[in-house]
Structures are given as structure tokens and as C-alpha cells.
Image (tube, rainbow, N blue to C red):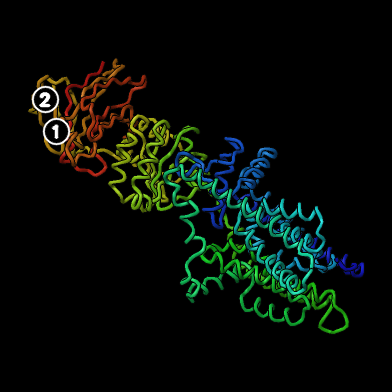
Amino acid sequence: MVPPLKTHWQNTFGLTLLLACLVGWGWNASRGWNTPGMLGHEFRQAQTALSVQAMQRDGFRLDYSTPILGKPWAIPMEFPLYQRLVSTYSNLTGEAVVQSGRMVSAILFIVGLLGVVALGRVLGFSWGASSIATVPIIAAPVYLFYSRTVMIESLAWSSSVWFLVGVLSYRARQDRWSLVLALGAGAIAVLVKATTWAAFCLPWAVWFFYDGYHALKRQGTDARSLLVQSFGIGVPLLVLGFSWVAFADSIKAQNPLAHFLLSAELKAFNFGTWEMRFDAENWAVMKEHWSRTFLPWWLWSGGLVVTLGLSRRRLLIGAMSFGFLGSQLIFFNLYRLHDYYFYANAALGCLVVGFGAAALWECRGRWFQGVAPALVTVVVIAGVQLREFSDGFRQLQVARSDGFTALSYVLPALTEPDEVIVAHAPGWGASEAFYADRRMLMIPDAQMFFNPDRVTQSLALLADESVPLLLMMRESRIQSDWLSNRIEDLGLWPVPLFETDSAVTAYARADRYGAMRAKVAAGEFAGIRLLSDQPKAPLEDRVLTAGSSFEADFDRLEIHPVSIVFPFGVGIYDDEEGSVLSTHAPTEMYFEIPPAATKLRFQFGLGDDVVNQQGFDGLGVNVELIHPDGTGSVIHSEWVPHGTDRPTRDVEVSLPTERSSRLLYHVVPGPQNQNAYDQAWLRYLRFE
């Protein structure tokens, strides 16, 4: 039974204090609200934001897309309720995904906080005391920061709080509505994030076994409540949770690169090993997390001892402590690696001191009991928490972070919304895909080392997609064999299109290289360097052909360059169809464009002994218009890969109306620069 309310002024004061704290919390949450960047585990935030973005495009589906690991795009982790709420809010208000995610998270935190007040009422505290108990939660750094991020945490937490309210209310009253609340809120919690729900199951377990012990001790006691809690709440929710995991695994298993996200593969990652739990260094990390997210370990431990000594509610305090500590021991590695995981259980730790203060609030008769000591307790605790927040998370919250990088602007400019971008990267972060609003096949380096066959399968699934760009990101750039394979797989032009300040090199598909290069050259993209626009051979290295000993031979071939760069010398030889000019990479030939010319025709090719040579990694022919300022614009690019069945190419190119000073015919080697095999020939080059 809930006891009679305390005096009116105590309840009014407690509720007013709660409202004031929420106002302060809201003011803090607004700091940096419109910053596009998602600092603070951006990897997880961007992944959620990318799913929301895809849901806005594709609609709500249980097998929702997270287009970062290739086809099929669905790699469901959690039930997509949060993503649905954010996409709906964004569509209704017109707010960006990031700000919409923050708003939904903030609202859900407040919903959960109201659940904490309701929990206090169910446990026998007055309105004022229940309100006081929430202060350490509101001031905890993990709730000040992560309650306004694009993450599922606040939904999982608030539904778990209301689940505990429902199950303990049913324990006390055994009414139908409490059972409905426990099942409804529990279903949301276990589907959205089972690890958070598990943290709140632990306090319930303490009361359950306490009641079970007394039921056994008092023979004949009605055990109906325990049976309903077991088979009416616990078992159905467990079945629901495992059913979702099985469904999600069946979807993820269809993606060749998502196998490492299957639940069986994540056991060690989630739970850690027994040895980890006995490692002092790991506990040092845990203590650091405590201070950063919640309270210094020594302050909380001291508060626990004092609370157990002063309060008559030792079962309650023990249950909260068990939930706080037990969840860390179960999912040890998750809590060790991620400070945001404390969003799930920090409230239980806060309620150890919060409910202790609530017990003081309702006591009378001694100098160390009553409203004043309770207020001093929560004020001191909140002061320590706010100082830690100011030194830690607040720096991230107010930091200027646009989120957008050079790639965020250039990728949408070069590609269409329905196209796919392939990338090799050390990890599989979704930030670039989200900010560019493009689907990506992000190939983690580990998959290339340990599961190359799966990478091959993922690339094969893109056969019916347009893939105009490859990104080699950071450390992946040194893997020249990966690059060679992708050039052949995707029909890329081997010369890099651009580099970014963040150590990303981009390669374009051969048929799009010229147009993309023109767009990059014409646009103003900060942080982008157009590598292929580097100067060609210096003037002093070019050989003038007029009056040279081989001018007559060039005339016979219908090839009339005004200057040439032939690093391996000029060679002309005969084949079955006539004479050809050897244009061994990296040959350059410069031509004057006749005033009346509207077309360019040429024929080039490679011998079968070249294209099938084991060391041959491809060769390209690039035709550019050289402008008076020395820059160039590509009008034709063609790539000849290893083993091609079309070693001879006949090309016709339309020339623009506005003339440039010269035309450059440039033969470029493959990505490994193995010039020994890059032997091409040119039969003729005519302006018409």
C-alpha cells in the first residue's frame, strides 16, 4: 500500500524541485542542439541516423535498411521503434534527422524520469520523496549528455523503467492494468535493447526470490503472483526477445559481410571472458567510466554503506545495487568498451542514494533525518556529478562539429541518389554514408584479410547496381592488390580522381571519370585535391616532331603530334593490318586541333601476350583538352583490364564547339605502375 501523503508543503517543494531540475536539464540539452555533428560515439549515432534516413526513403519495415555493408541492405540489430519515431517526427516537422533524433531522445528521457517518480510511489514513497530521488539521475553526466543524442538508449531505458513500475505494481496489487503495463513496456524494452531490459530485471529478481523464499517458508501462502510474474510476464518477454534475435539473425545472414554481427559471433564481444573480470586494468577502466558517467566509485560505495545503515529499506537498496553492479558483471566487455552503456544501469546506481535521500526526507525526530539532510545529500551528489560533466561530456556537447566532411559535399555532387559507392576502410563507420545520403558497401580491412570470399560475394551482389566510385580510406590505401582487384571488378579508371585532407583517395569508373573530374574542377570543394589535374610533362621534356627523323613515319600513320613524351623511345612496327605506333605507358602526345574539326577518331590496342600477362594490371588511355592556362578537361577515358577479350578499341569522340589550345593523348599505367607490361599501340588518330 502507498502510505498517506506527507505534508502538502513537502510534496509541493519536492515536485517544484523536480520541475526546476528538469528546466535546468533542458537548458543544458539545448547547448549545441543545432550542431550537425554527432560527437560522442559517433559510430553508433551515425549508424542509427543512417537507418532513419533509409526509413524516410523506404518506409517502415522490420527488415529495415542500414545501407553500409552492401546488399541486401538490411542488417537489423534492434527493433526499429526509435527509428520510426524519429523518421515520423522529422517528416512531420521538417527537422533534420540529427535534431529530430535528439528531440525524440530527450522526450523519452523525460518519460522515463516520470516512470522513476511512479516507481517511488509504488515502493511507498510520497510524491515529494519520489521527486527528490530523481535528482541524482537528472544530474548524472551520462543522462545529461546521451539523452540528447541520436541513439536508442533513452527509449530502451524509459520502457525498462516503466516495465519495473508495472511488475512491482503487480506484485503489490495484482491488478490487470499493472500486468498490461509490465507486458507492454517490457515488450518494447526487450525488443529495442535487451541488455537494458536485463539490467532492470535484476532488481525484480531480488524481490521475486525474496517473495519466493517467504512463500516457501509460510506454507499455504498464495503463490499466484509469483506464477503470473514467471509465466505471464518473464517467459513471454524472453520468448519475444529471443524471437526477435532469431528474426534479425536470419536477415543479417543474407548479407555476406554481416556475418560478424550475428548473435552467435557477438557472444564474446557482449559478455567478455572470465579472465577479463579478474584483470585489475579492466576494473581501472570501469572505475574511470563510473566517474565519467555516474559517480566516483568511492563516493557511491560510501553512500551505499551509509544508506544501508540509515535506511529501513535495505531490500530496496540491495535490489537497486544488484541491478547496477550485476548488469556490469554480466555484460562486462560492453560496459568496459562503451561508456554510453551506463545509460542502462546508472539510474539504478543513482537510486541507491536517491531512495536513501527519499527515506531521510520522510523521517522525523532526529537531527540527521528529515528534509534538510535529504536536500544536502542530493545537492552534494548533484554538485559532484555536474562538475564531472563540466570537465568531460560538456566539452563534446558544445564543441563545433559540422559532421560534414569534404566527402559529404563531393560525393552527392558526383553520384546519383540511387547509385552505390564502394569503400575500403579500417572499419565500417556510417558517418560518410549518412552525411552524403548515399548507399555504400564499406569493406572493413579485417574482412579482406580473413574473409575475402565474402567480399567477393558482396561485390557480385552489386552487379545490377551503378557503382561509379571507389574510396580507399586511410590505412587501406597501402593495399595496392585490393585496389587492382577493384579496378578490374568495377571498371575503374586507374588514375586517382581526388584525395581529401582526411586521407581518402577516390577512383572513378572509366566511363564517368572525365565528367567527374570536370565537376570537381569546376566546383569549390574544400579539402579536395584533384590529383589527376597535375601538370603533365614539363615543356623542356617534350620532343618536337616537326623536322624530326620520325616525322615522315608519323605522317604515314595519320598521327600528327606537335610534341611527344616517349619515355621508352619512339617505336613503329608492322602487324597483319599495317603499321602501328608503340605508345608504351606513360606516353604523352600533344596535338593542335584543326579549326574545323568536330570529331576525333583513333584506334588503339594491346597484344594478347600483354593483356594475358600475369603481371599486367591494366592500362588506360586518356584524351584531354589542354586549356590556355595549362589545365585540362577529360573528353574520353578508356580502361583495358587484365585478360580482356577486347584488346583492340575503335574510338569516336565529339569535340566541343569552344576550342582549347591543344589535345593530349595520354597512355597511363595500371595502379601498380608495372610499366614493363604496359605496352599499347596506336594505329591512327584523325581529326574530322
Identify the residue position indicated by label 1 in the image.
609
685 left or right of 75? left
Question: Tag 2 or tag 1, which sits nearer the N-term?
Answer: 2
Q: Position of residue 103 (x, y in %)?
A: 68, 49
- Give the distance between the C-alpha atoms of the residues marked 1 and 2, in whole angstroms: 29 Å
> Tag 2's secondary structure?
helix
Q: What amino acid type is highlighted by mark number 2?
A: Glu
Q: Is 662 placed above or below 438 here?
A: above
Q: What amino acid type is highlighted by mark number 1?
A: Asp
Q: Is 77 placed above or below 338 here?
A: above
| Labels 1 and 2 touching (C-beta < 8 A) | no
Q: Residue at x 56, y 39 (%)?
A: 54
Identify the residue position indicated by label 2 in the image.
551
Query: Of tags 1 and 2, which is closer to the observer?
Result: 1
Q: Quadrant of the C terminus?
A: top left
Q: Quadrant of the N terminus?
A: bottom right
Q: Position of residue 315 (x, y in %)?
A: 73, 74
Q: Residue at x 61, y 52 (%)?
A: 241
- Disc 1 packing (10 Å; few <14; some 14–19; many ≥20): few
Taking the view exactly as shown, the residue that stands out farthest to the bottom is: 367
Q: Is 458 placed above or below 280 here?
A: above
Q: Position of residue 473 (x, y in %)?
A: 39, 49
